[in-house]
Image: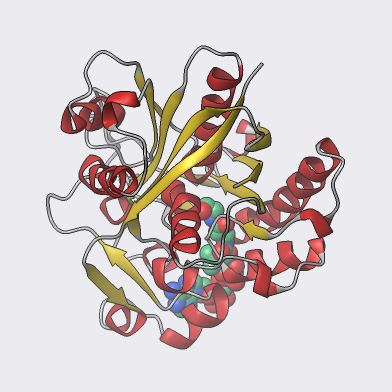
Amino acid sequence: MYYSRIVATGSYLPEKVLTNHELEEMVDTSDDWIVERTGIRSRHIAAEGETASMLAEKAVRKAIEDSPVSLSDIDMIIVATTTGDLVMPCTAAILQDRLEVPGIPVFDVATACAGFIYGLSIADQFIRTGHMKTILVVGTEVMSSILDWTDRRTCVLFGDGAGVAILQRSEEPGILSTHIHADGSYNDILYVPSSLPGQFDAEKLPYVQMAGNKVFKFAVKALGDVVIEALAANDATKADIDWLIPHQANMRIITATAKKLGLPMERVIVTVETHGNTSAASVPLALDLAIRDGRVQRGQKILLEGFGGGLAWGSAFITY
Ligand code: UT7
């Protein structure tokens, strides 16, 4: 039995920044409301024609550039996304072509904002069992493409971006545990109606639909529960956590999770203020940022959490 360990990370944010003040000109909202209810001040928005695979490619190249891993080492690509380039093939295949690494298996994971955690969990299983040595896990989103820009309840919340982690076989523990969950009976409180021609419904346009309050309540409980589950599985306590990197949907959810854990906010990585909710990209974006600015150091223990449409959620407890 082997361990898997994160050996490199990368991220990419599109150039265009959309501020709350600019949104005030677009819908009936205010900077005060958005900041108070979500903690978001600005988000990045992809340029016209800029797709999830393009953002992902930039993030991967950044990860590779700063690491001993080369593209030819990669044994599998897992892409977590809700906003893939095409219905078919999967975005992982388009990314594979961009990276020019033919032949290896590639696939997408469609568990929305929990997708990166699901991807880490899958990659960890393949490496632990000795089937593969090096796996690229990507979270990439162009959420701006599935937003109704006249709906103030959703369009102020999301942003675009990509984050990646490269996992590699290791003698020392890196990924200590992953736990993934879903409850499909809540599929109607956070969803995007179909845009497929055969299923297109003019009454239900293919934009994010969310019963914000219900999702909020579920998220606070589920994210609190996975923390307890992860600690118990590792015979650990909150004192063992150097950093919490939660899904970045809402500052109030992040604060509630930290409070439940008794973790001071200085030990929580927060990007929601300037990234908004980038769905599957939010956790790897925050991880890469905190590694590059020196907060996250080798040997530290980090708890990563994801939560989103499905509803789906999960955690990864790692030694970086
Ligand atoms: O990443 C996937 C997981 N997603 C989440 O975890 C998101 C979870 N939910 C949330 O973050 C919050 O529920 C929201 C930020 C989406 C909404 O915050 P809330 O405190 O739950 O507000 P609400 O939906 O209860 O709406 C309160 C009021 C409503 O007005 P009325 O009906 O009370 O008159 C809304 O119409 O705020 C109004 N409102 C807005 N006002 C100004 C909703 N959106 C806006 C807006 N600007 N952008």
**Coordinates of residue 250 in the picture (x, y in percent):** 56, 66
Q: Which residue does the image show at 24% across and 42% down from the upper left? A: 57
**Coordinates of residue 200 in the picture (x, y in percent):** 27, 34
- Residue placed most toward the observer, 39 or 239: 239
Q: Which residue does the image show at 48% across and 87% down from the upper left? A: 32
Instruction: Give the image's coloring scheme.
Output: secondary structure
Q: Which residue does the image show at 22% across and 58% down from the upper left? A: 46
**Coordinates of residue 265 in the picture (x, y in percent):** 68, 73
As drawn, the residue found furthest toward the left would be 49
Left or right: residue 105 compared with residue 225: left
- Residue placed most toward the observer, 152 or 130: 130
Find residue 82 and report its image quarter.
Answer: top left
**Coordinates of residue 37 in the picture (x, y in percent):** 56, 76
- Residue placed most toward the observer, 318 or 277: 318
Image label count: 0
Give above or below for 247 relative to 100.
Answer: below
